[in-house]
Image: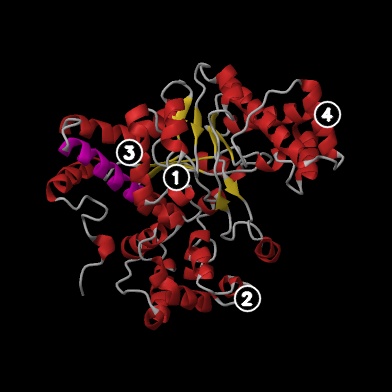
Amino acid sequence: MSQSIAAHPDRLLPADPGTRSIARSLLERVQDLPILSPHGHVDAAVIEHNTPFPDPAALLVTPDHYVTRLIHASGVPMDRLRPENATPREIWRTFCEAWPLFDGTASGYWLRTQFDGVFGLQQELGPETADSSFDAISARLSEPGFRPRELFKDFNIEVLATTDDPLDSLSSHHAIANDAAFHGRVLPTFRPDAYINIANPAWASNVERLIESAGDGATGYRGYITALENRRRYFVEHGAVSADHGVRTPLTLKLDEAEAQRLFEHALSGNATPQDRDVFEAHMMYQMARMSVADGLVMTIHPGSFRNHHEPTFKAFGADTGHDIPFAVNYTEAIRPLLQDFGTAKDFHLVLFTLDETVFSRELAPLAGFYPSVYLGAPWWFLDAPDAMLRFRSAVTETAGFSRSSGFIDDTRAFCSIPARHDASRRIEASFLARLVAEHRISEERAHELIVDIVDSAPRRVFKL
């Protein structure tokens, strides 16, 4: 049997032999460094309880919108990919029939790498191997050593951050932190979207629970702000290093308290307009920055996604089902009110992400090249693909250098894909640096220093690890 392309030692490295040789040397320098994952969506309870992974379809297909969206685009009804409508084996067969669709995609690359490196799968996927591959992966999942805690160690993960509701008890994080047998750090991340975005249907009830739980007896807008401050403090006490914000746009506004209170009360009464919603969310982004300056949580902003673009699919199957679509954003003007007051604040770290590649060189790199607080978030979601990551480096480095970037962010719910994603990033960084060396733009000695900083020092520095 020929070697799997997922196991080829030169995958993602430059085709030019001379540049490839330099990239190999750079990759070797960082290949075995520990994984630092300061933003992701793995459930801490899975690690606390060392929960066995489910069947292959539930692990690799149904929760992954990268996978289901492309299969659906080929004409497969969404219900054929849902566990309530099809058995795991049936879903896996549908996935294997669609496997050729993933050639050239980032998700195809990650999946191939998992199949080879994590599951030891020795066969190419297709309709004729659907059942045998399902059985082979199922057998691997049933092994006693194939559990989250064991894989956490095998994957060489040092830090894994989760994404958590502000009212979460963080009991799993507490249990993991106090477990002497567990070696590694699992950190909570404060994610207040459902308590800030008043377009969320559950916003009013969420806010009422928040104020009742953490408002220190205050009510209204003042109780709301107090409760958010208190819950952030609780997260810091349980090891959190960042607060993440999945906002529609990067707009920020500084309102006086009377106007903020008016909008808050208007929203609670159910009379907020779409403009009110945007203004209030923008004001709360300013407030979140103010709180980050006070409590030290790194502030990350993930804007620019039109959520649930296809309403019939959303109504039938809910959110995160593959039809969140990027749109253009404006950072320079939108983020200015926040940066006027906090852009040079001591120890404030603001990590800006985008789904709009056009702002990399035009807006984000210049912002990070001036403001001490601003760091460039790694290519995210649709952009966390090999060619897009290379475009990111090319777009931002000439203005902001290497020191102003966050390090790689895997942003994944798929625990078994974490090493594949980080390996891909390290290969891309090696490739980019190798080109600069080959073009005599930096020395090879300096490239070796830079790749260690990009892979290891940058996430520690930016996320205060």
Please tell me in which quadrant of the rendered image residue 301 appears. top right
Q: Is residue 6 magenta?
A: no
Q: Amino acid at mark 3?
A: Ser
| SS state under label 4 | helix
Report if residue 117 is visible in the image.
yes
**Whole-number angstrom distance, CA of label 3 to CA of label 2:** 45 Å
The magenta span reads: 422-438
x, y (%) of residue 461?
40, 28
The Cα–Cα distance between marks 3 and 4, rounded to whole angstroms, is 46 Å
Quarter of the picture holding the C terminus? top left
Badge nearest the viewer, 1 or 2: 2
Name the magenta segment's main secondary structure: helix
Q: Nearer the viewer, mark 4 or mark 2?
A: 4
Residue placed at 70% from the left, 31% from the top?
Answer: 228
Q: Residue under label 2, please give it.
A: 85
Q: To which residue does mark 4 refer?
A: 262
Q: Nearer the viewer, residue 68 or 357?
A: 357
Residue neighbourhood size for the residue with mark 1, other residues' Cα within 10 Å, grouped as few (<14), some (14–19), many (≥20): some
> Who's the residue at 69% across and 66% down the image?
316
Q: Nearer the viewer, mark 4 or mark 1?
A: 4
Q: Earlier in the sequence, mark 3 or mark 1?
A: 1
Of residues 119 and 313, which is closer to you in this image?
Answer: 313
Q: Position of residue 270 (x, y in %)?
A: 85, 43
